Amino acid sequence: MTRERRHNIDVIAGRDDDDEYYVADNAYNDIWGFKGLDEIEYAIIGRANGIEIFDISTNPESPELKKTIDGPTGASVRDIKIYNYYAYVVYDGDDTPSSPELKVNDQDPQDQGMQIVDLRDPSNAYVVGRYTADFRRCHNIFISGGYLYACLVSNNNDARKPMHILELHRTPYLPRLVGIYNDMVVHDIYVRGNIAYAAVPEDYRFPGHNSSGVMILDVSDKSNIREIGKIIIPEDYTHNTCLSEDGNYLFVTNEIIGGGLRIYNVRNLSFPCFVKKHTAGSGLVIHN
């Protein structure tokens, strides 16, 4: 967020490049939040080499670092979501092998699956397990209804990087694979109920079209996901999606300079309609 373009927002605290923690191997790349069992609100910040957990409600003007948890290094992308006091942490980066001293059991740090962190005591949070079943690394995740949707999964078999659907609600610390979707490559996804809005990047264009965009999917049967409709977005790199509170409008961001934010009416899932496009300032990207 650029300081000159804030609207109805006051910054009361933050971490920026003047902080001692912001160094080349510690750059921040994601943030999520949750309310603990102690009723305190916490923020989890992703770094290139792990995560940090902050108490942001006891003294909002000076958030307190409660716990640092190391993870695979070299992650230019780290994504964090929370379910039932467990954090699920995935990471992604380039395919350059890490130096030998960083390997664990002769495995590259970037290829160690998904970390699962127990948050029931945030000051003493710890990695309770990893999910590694055909799951080396991942770009984005989303959790809805006790299921985790993992996008752009790198595994050992499929160069298309399919989406994996994992069941969490029975044993959150032991995810169970219940479906794989590989009809199209999904960069990021938003799910509400049994409907998913999947962002398909420009690299993987819809059959019969010279563009990609958004797939609208019925995910009621996790093992047999079905397409309901699609939104074709020309010339943009579709990055992510989010649904309005009333479920009538879909917001779509595009990960290119000038790509902007598009709004669609999705009352009719089979025939979504374009409503408006908002473009950020010159040289800016609306990323999420």
Image (cartoon, rainbow, N blue to C red):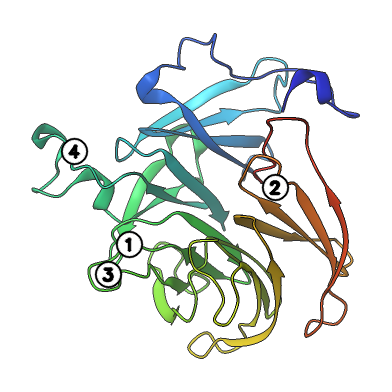
Residue sitting nearer the eye, 281 or 6:
281
CB atoms at circles 4 and 3 under 8 Å apart?
A: no
Q: Which mark is residue 259?
A: 2
Residue drawn at the location 70% of the way across and 18% of the way down: 13
Q: Which residue is mark 4?
A: 98
> What separation in Å lies between label 3 and label 2 (alpha carbons)?
34 Å
Give the label, 1 or 2, closer to the camera: 2
Q: Is residue 235 left or right of residue 28?
A: right
- The amino acid type found where label 2 is placed reads Gly
Amino acid marked by disc 4: Ser
Residue type at mark 3? Asp
Q: The N terminus lies in which quarter of the figure?
A: top right
Residue plotted at (35% across, 24% down):
25
Query: Of callouts 3 and 1, which one flags the residue occurring earlier in the amino acid sequence?
Result: 3
Q: Residue at x 49, y 47 (%)?
A: 79
Q: Position of residue 116 (x, y in %)?
A: 40, 53
Identity, as a three-letter code, of the amino acid under mark 1: Ser
Looking at the image, residue 231 sits to the left or right of residue 42; the answer is right
Q: Secondary structure at mark 2?
A: loop
Q: Earlier in the sequence, mark 3 or mark 2?
A: 3
Q: 121 or 156: which is nearer to us? A: 156
- Label 4 SS: loop
* Numbered tag placed on residue 134 in the rendering: 3
Mark 1 Cα within 10 Å, few/some/many (few <14, many 20+)?
many
Spatial CA distance of label 1 from label 2 is: 27 Å
